Image (cartoon, coloured by chain):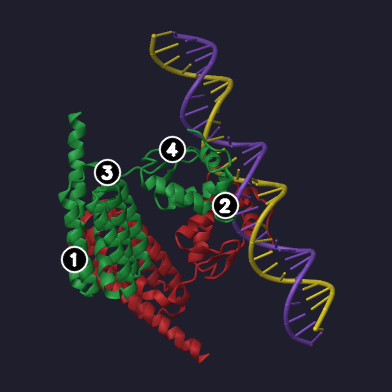
Chain colours: A red, B green, C yellow, D purple
DNA sequence: TGTATTTTTCGTGTCGACAAGTTTTCGACC
DNA sequence: GGTCGAAAACTTGTCGACACGAAAAATACA
């Protein structure tokens, strides 16, 4: 692995250092480039990004606050593990946030919001068409994030984004077992959500969101069960 | 204001510096010792706590992640303002978290949880008896936090604690207009919640929590309206 | 006297270095 | 050869110092 020593291409403005590191690490954690349990070496990172340890440590504090990394005092900080024992708490919260954000979107969406949501849905549909599982995962996240934005409640948005990112990590683990049938169903369900939001039908939006959440939760559960059988079979 | 220069009483172990600063600032912000908008000077703080700026900055990053302070790039970081324009989003989320956590507590509470909840309720009742408004605010927070703990969902707990702290700041502003009638009603409502949780009556717990939330939201609204009238009168 | 511009001051953002603690390695002893 | 203990290597936590940028002060000008 050859590392270029402080290439001028990576020069950053003052004040963007923390943000820079934060976003890189965040993406690498969510995309499982850094799998759960990976130790994060501050010095190594500092050399790789050609900057001092100070902004890196501050980015790690921020990531720790969001639960993406865990700091072991006086020892290394590691990428947080996915807590498979308490998955039900995750699914519970995820389902509720799906419902609440969709509800609020139906209530408060502006025309501009609708446009964004529609374009995100188009991106998701395209990922399904081209059978790009990784793109499905990320565009699905963006679709629901756009809905949450339209709901205009920063408290729900914050929790929801955290849950969506956590969900992305799980889906990445099992994405190879995506089958072809379900994704198309998701596209249809998304269309239903968009229609309910456009029609400002709050009750319908809530109901469809709950159904959609159940679908996703069940799929993740099935993927995990299948994977477990495979692992046992090995 | 005389500050003692690096008194040996404030000597801390390695690795506790950030936590130390974080907790001090957090308490001072929630108790309005540092009112919204106050600038936080890193150098001043470093001198006051007789430590370097590094751990202080890391504590500020953490506080910023929780929304308690706002960092103005290349300028000072200030205590976050209370967003009175979007209060309804706060009340919405607070009400939902009241309901969800109480529900889950009724479902999952252990005998030990019940004991903690009861003792918190006793503390709240005592604060009401002695008409200690400030103690009412903090014990009320601890009571609901204990219920959320019993619900055993870290995602809800995290959001709820954040909302409760934000609510504490608001109540502090208006606590002088606490009147004597409502607090006793809160004690009774809390008793109802505890009974529902003990009986594992999920539907009842949900209903009572929703009513309780409405009470609190309405009281805060009334306090604010009263205060606004006073301000206009001046 | 009021306004525009330069200078000064001040605080943050970043850095390199040192100190303390943990893990690993090496060596002594059984 | 295996186990226990000491020393070395490494990583984190903290520090003091410098550089950049923004606000405030001082100066020039109308």
Mark in front: 4 vs 2? 2
Q: CA distance from mark 1 to mark 2?
A: 44 Å
Measured as percent of width and height from the top left, residue A196 is found at 21, 64
| Residue behind mark 3 | B84
Q: Secondary structure at mark 1?
A: helix
Numbered circle sitting on residue B39 = 4
Sequence-first disc among 3 and 4: 4
| Residue behind mark 1 | B192
Sequence-first disc among 4 and 2: 2
Q: CA distance from mark 4 to mark 1?
A: 43 Å
Q: Quadrant of residue B125?
A: bottom left
- Asked if one can make out residue B112 in the rendered structure from this viewpoint, the answer is yes
| Residue behind mark 2 | B12
Marks 4 and 1 on same chain: yes
Tell me if residue A131 comes above or below residue A159 in the rendering.
below
The residue lying at 41 percent from left, 45 percent from top is B28
Q: CA distance from mark 2 to mark 3?
A: 39 Å
Marks 3 and 4 on same chain: yes
Q: Secondary structure at mark 2?
A: loop
Marks 3 and 1 on same chain: yes
The residue lying at 31 percent from left, 69 percent from top is B115
Mark in front: 4 vs 1? 1
Pointer 1 indicates a residue of which chain?
Answer: B
Sequence-first disc among 1 and 2: 2
Pointer 3 indicates a residue of which chain?
Answer: B
Sequence-first disc among 4 and 1: 4
């Amino acid at each position: 692995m050859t590392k270029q020593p402080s290439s001028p291409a990576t020069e950053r403005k003052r004040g963007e250092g923390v943000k820079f590191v934060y976003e890189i690490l965040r993406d690498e954690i969510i995309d499982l480039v850094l799998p759960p349990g990976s130790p994060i070496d501050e010095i190594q990172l500092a050399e790789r990004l050609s900057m001092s340890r100070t902004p890196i440590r501050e980015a790690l504090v921020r990531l720790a606050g969001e639960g993406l990394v865990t700091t072991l005092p006086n020892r290394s900080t590691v990428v947080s593990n996915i807590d498979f024992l308490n998955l039900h708490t995750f699914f519970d919260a995820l389902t509720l946030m799906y419902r609440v954000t969709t509800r609020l979107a139906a209530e408060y969406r502006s025309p501009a919001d609708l446009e964004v949501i529609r374009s995100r849905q188009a991106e998701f549909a395209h990922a399904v068409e081209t059978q790009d599982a990784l793109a499905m995962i990320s565009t699905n996240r963006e679709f629901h994030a756009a809905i949450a934005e339209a709901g205009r409640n920063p408290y729900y948005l914050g929790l929801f984004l955290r849950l969506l990112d956590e969900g992305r990590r799980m889906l990445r683990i099992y994405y190879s077992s995506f089958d072809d049938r379900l994704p198309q169903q998701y596209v249809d369900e998304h269309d239903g959500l968009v229609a309910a939001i456009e029609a400002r039908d709050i009750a319908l939006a809530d109901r469809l969101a709950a159904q959609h959440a159940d679908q996703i939760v069940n799929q993740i559960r099935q993927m995990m069960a299948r994977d477990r059988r495979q692992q046992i079979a090995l």
